[in-house]
Image (cartoon, coloured by chain):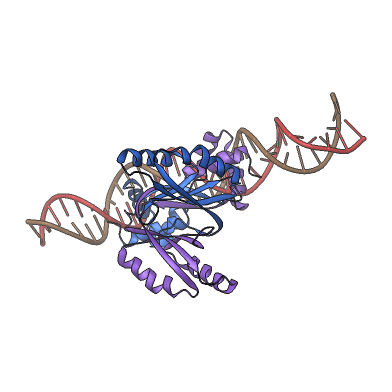
Chain colours: A purple, B blue, C red, D brown
Amino acid sequence: MVEEQDERILAELQKDGRATNQQLAETVGMSTSACWRRVRALEESGVISGYSALVARERAGFATSAILHVSLERHDVKFVDEFVARVTKRREVLECFATTGDADYHLRVVVRDMDAYNKFLDEFMFRIPGIRHVRTNVILKEIKTGVALPF
Amino acid sequence: MVEEQDERILAELQKDGRATNQQLAETVGMSTSACWRRVRALEESGVISGYSALVARERAGFATSAILHVSLERHDVKFVDEFVARVTKRREVLECFATTGDADYHLRVVVRDMDAYNKFLDEFMFRIPGIRHVRTNVILKEIKTGVALPF
DNA sequence: GTGTATTTGGTAAAATCTACCAAATCGGAG
DNA sequence: CTCCGATTTGGTAGATTTTACCAAATACAC
């Protein structure tokens, strides 16, 4: 479905999401029109789901982030759906994964400071129905925060 | 440093990293030239660290991902630096955070399939010197994978 | 208020995007 | 191999966008 040349395009657009079509065509080695059509196809088929500016967290004033391990009390669809719906809406939650292991979910949360994090827990997380346990691991240092799939 | 109007620009460029300067200027409510200069300033000051196409993981052929909890045997700079250097280079590791809590590091790893993950552990992770313990939590479902800071 | 520095909006040339065309390439079927 | 239809390709041109510059407006210190 996604072939050789598409992967080169994807790799390049992951590295520079604002590369001009001409640059792109040159680096992947095809004509501008062929390249443009492929990019368009990748967008329309949903392989490329969007484009985003990557903003330096600290410089933008978000000093605090944490990884949360969340377990639910019960796993009825009712509680699960409610949890998923709330977490999806909440913008401080950048990532949420259902995982194997002790916790049901891993979340990454980004806020401006510890006060905001405390508020996040009290006013949001602890009010979600059916939560059994929340463990917070504060992020001391970001070693790497990538978005590029390893083509 | 980053003010009101800059935040609107950042929010918009996080949502659509390929918005034209004209669209952007319109949605944030300033002239195209003023808007363009601010974007440029945000790029040059490093607040915007780059742009990226967001690629749908599964559609691009990466079926398997996991969260790893890694602890080091010893915490001399020597071992820490080596660990950080290796992890930073390895492209399957999308994210790596030093955290409080039981594990020293949280990693998110993305690969094509379980074979590739097994290989990743054997040929990469387990060969890093000074590793005490690695626990794998396979990601069952991606509830949310965002990159946008919550302005 | 005055002078200086910074930011603003407008403009025009250069670069880019995007839709179209005809030519080239591919993949069977005979 | 040759023909045919289908797909993909490269080129082109008009519309759009970017980008650097200018003069005017605004902000700021004295």
Can you give x and y, in whole percent of width and height, for residue A51 in the image?
49, 52
What residue is shown at x 35% (from left), y 42% (from top)? Answer: B80
Q: Measured along the vertical axis of the image, is residue B39 above or below residue D4?
A: below
The quarter of the picture where the C terminus of chain A appears is top right
Can you give x and y, in whole percent of width and height, for residue A127 in the image?
44, 75
Can you give x and y, in whole percent of width and height, for residue A53 in the image?
43, 52
Q: Measured along the vertical axis of the image, is residue A36 above or below residue B103?
A: above
Q: Is residue B22 left or right of residue C8?
A: right
Query: In this orientation, which residue lies closer to the viewer: A132 or B53?
Result: A132
Q: Using the rendered view, name the quadrant where residue B22 is placed.
A: bottom left
Tally of numbered tags: 0
Is residue B105 visible to us here?
yes
Is residue B30 visible to us here?
no
Can you give x and y, in whole percent of width and height, for residue A22 in the image?
52, 38
Q: Is residue A93 left or right of residue C6?
A: right
The quarter of the picture where the N terminus of chain A appears is top right
What residue is shown at x 52% (from left), y 34% (from top)? Answer: A27
Query: In this orientation, which residue lies closer to the viewer: A35 or B36?
Result: A35
